[in-house]
Image (tube, helix red, strand yellow):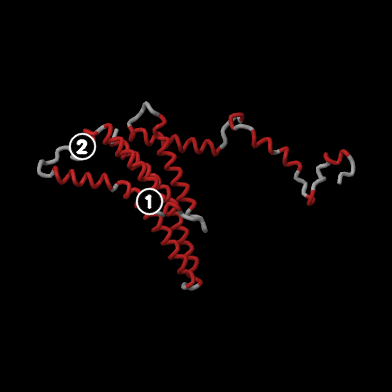
Amino acid sequence: MMMNLFSIFDPLCISLNLSMNWISSMLSILFIPSTFWLTYSRMNMLWTKILLNIHNELMPLLKIYYNKGATIIFSSLFIYIVFNNFLGLFPYIFTSTSHLSLTLTLALPLWLSYMMYGWINQTNHMFTHLVPQNTPFILMPFMVLIESVSNLIRAITLSVRLTANMIAGHLLMVLLSNMSMFLEIHLIPLLMLIQFLLLTLESAVSIIQAYVFMILSTLYSSEVN
């Protein structure tokens, strides 16, 4: 119950003795658009630098210099896989990229769209791509068979490569952590050092596998253009 009419303006007049009225003065900052700031934040500058480097890396592979937005899908794919790989290194966080249900979902639509676009719009190019140049006439039927199988399993190899690398590193870290209960006390620091080095290696593998997935997807798309 208010003691007087002006008690609503008292910052201490709140239940549970929590003076939270001044928070409303800070909420206005959250509603200011980022374009009103004079300079970008360091996080924005970092992401802009990363995306620009990825764009410059992919443009020579795509060979589409007039379409600057062609690299957006591959850079987004790279960032998504890197985030999932890194989050899987933290304790008690599910590693989604270690399951084929996710990696195959990423690779299969890309591969299927490449194949449909190539065989519908550039059929002759897809047929000639099955036989490399300077192939002997006797080996042509075998090369067609080999190239056909290679094209059919590309989605599987993309997904299995990422999944296998994530599973291998996590299994090795779990096996080493389970050894701690069987080791003597003076060997525990050595085990911790090995696990730290393995964690550093897994961090590098997380970036490398995302980069390999992005580059191979880009190369597969460049073959049908």
Name the kind of residue labelled 1 in the image: Leu
Residue at mark 2 to residue at mark 1: CA–CA distance: 29 Å
Residue 95: x percent and y percent? 46, 54
| Image quarter of the C terminus | top left
- On screen, 94 above or below 225? below
Which residue is drawn at the image coordinates 56% and 33% (left, top)? 40
Front-lying residue, 44 or 132: 132
Q: In the drawing, does residue 7 fall left or right of residue 170?
A: right
Residue 152: x percent and y percent? 27, 46
Q: In the drawing, does residue 127 fall left or right of residue 213?
A: left
Mark 1 neighbour density, 10 Å: few (under 14) some (14–19) many (20 or more): many
Residue 23: x percent and y percent? 72, 41
Q: Residue reaching furthest top?
A: 66
Name the kind of residue labelled 2 in the image: Phe
Mark sitting earlier along the chain (2/1): 2
Q: Residue reaching furthest left?
A: 138
Quadrant of res 216: top left
**Number of callouts in the render?**
2
Q: In the drawing, does residue 189 fall left or right of residue 33?
A: left
Quadrant of res 64: top left
Which residue is drawn at the image coordinates 14% and 40% (left, top)? 135
Secondary element at image label 1 = helix
Residue at the spot of label 1: 162
Residue at the spot of label 2: 127
